[in-house]
Amino acid sequence: MSTPSSVSDVGEHALIALIRDRVPPAPSWVAVGLGDDAAVVEPERNLLEVFTTDALVEGIHFDRAFTPPWAIGHRALAVNLSDVAAMGATPRLALLSLVLPPALPVTEFTALLDGLLALAACHRVRLVGGNITRSPGPLMVDITATGSVHRRRVLRRSGARPGDEVWVSGQLGAAAAGLASLQTAVVRDPAYAGCEAAFLAPEPRVRLGTLLGRNRAASACVDLSDGLADGLHQLAAASAVGIEVDSAAIPIAPAAEAWFTALGQDAVLAAVTGGDDYELLFTVSPRARRRFLTVRHQLGDLPLTRIGTVGTMPDVVWTREGRRERVPSGYVHFR
Ligand SMILES: [Mg+2]
């Protein structure tokens, strides 16, 4: 049997052809898509364009020992779509910059593409360009994504006002527990398969973000890439307000609670400071309450939980075990 070919055997042009063959035909608003020096896009009238970029780097954001290639592709796009959604925008297109170790098998390259394009298809995101470069070390997937949103529908971090309710989507802590399980477990325990899936294939809350924006139901919004604690501090600082958190209301994934408790850790603390949740944290003003109920109705079964209230105090606080204290800051990338 011949050895499976690596990306360096195949070469850049053939890899790009592999991508082009897989991308569905461009819609009419893409005037020039894949295959030219740059993409040309026709902006829609009365819509603002949202831009974001985020890279996944092997050894920092994932370990190829336990992150399958499809999950690398999925995550790389998901983290960008989560940022677009947090702005209340509908994701539209993506640019993909791949930095590949030459020995990467072509089968892994195509699997990475599978994960990325499957999520793109889910959210009707068009891949319109990119680049492939050789890496002297780690695999890197760098994506730029755009979205569109009406001027008055943009969700920012800075709109929270005293008296607003604080809400969060989904359940927290599963991705952090899943990553810990993937990193440490010698034998996979099926009880934590859901947590591992939450880390490997996070679901960006695209529908929630666009519905909150379209209905003007949220006064401020941020996505939880670095955990709930970090999101609360980011939102409070940007809005120049304080937040009183009801720690008992924080929705922690039951399997994550089991994981952290089994290790003798404080499950609430671990869940709010662990990253990679990609849920949305947002505030709802009393005036927007009815519009928010409409959003909840349209959303279906994604859980939304009220976890606190915006106030005039200068910080983010909660009461735990009878003590009122500052919510700790979350995950920090450069420490
Ligand atoms: Mg973000």
Image (cartoon, rainbow, N blue to C red):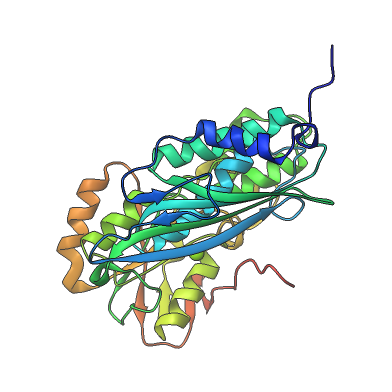
**Residue 256 x, y percent position in the rendering:** 57, 46
User: Residue at left 84%, top 52%?
Assistant: 136
Q: How many marks?
A: 0
Q: Is residue 11 visible?
A: yes
Q: Is residue 321 visible?
A: no
Q: Quadrant of the C terminus?
A: bottom right
- The image quadrant of residue 287 is bottom left
Of residue 79 and residue 236, the one placed in the foreground of this image is: 79
On screen, residue 320 versus residue 246, left or right, reads: right
Q: Is residue 63 above or below residue 106?
A: below
User: Residue at left 40%, top 62%?
Assistant: 86
On screen, residue 106 versus residue 152, left or right, reads: right
Q: Is residue 72 above or below residue 193?
A: below
On screen, residue 46 versus residue 22, left or right, reads: left
Q: Quadrant of the N terminus?
A: top right
Outermost residue toward the front?
A: 36
**Residue 300 x, y percent position in the rendering:** 26, 42
**Residue 231 x, y percent position in the rendering:** 50, 68
**Residue 146 x, y percent position in the rendering:** 43, 58
User: Residue at left 40%, top 82%?
Assistant: 239
User: Residue at left 24%, top 72%?
Assistant: 152
Q: Is residue 133 above or below residue 158?
A: above
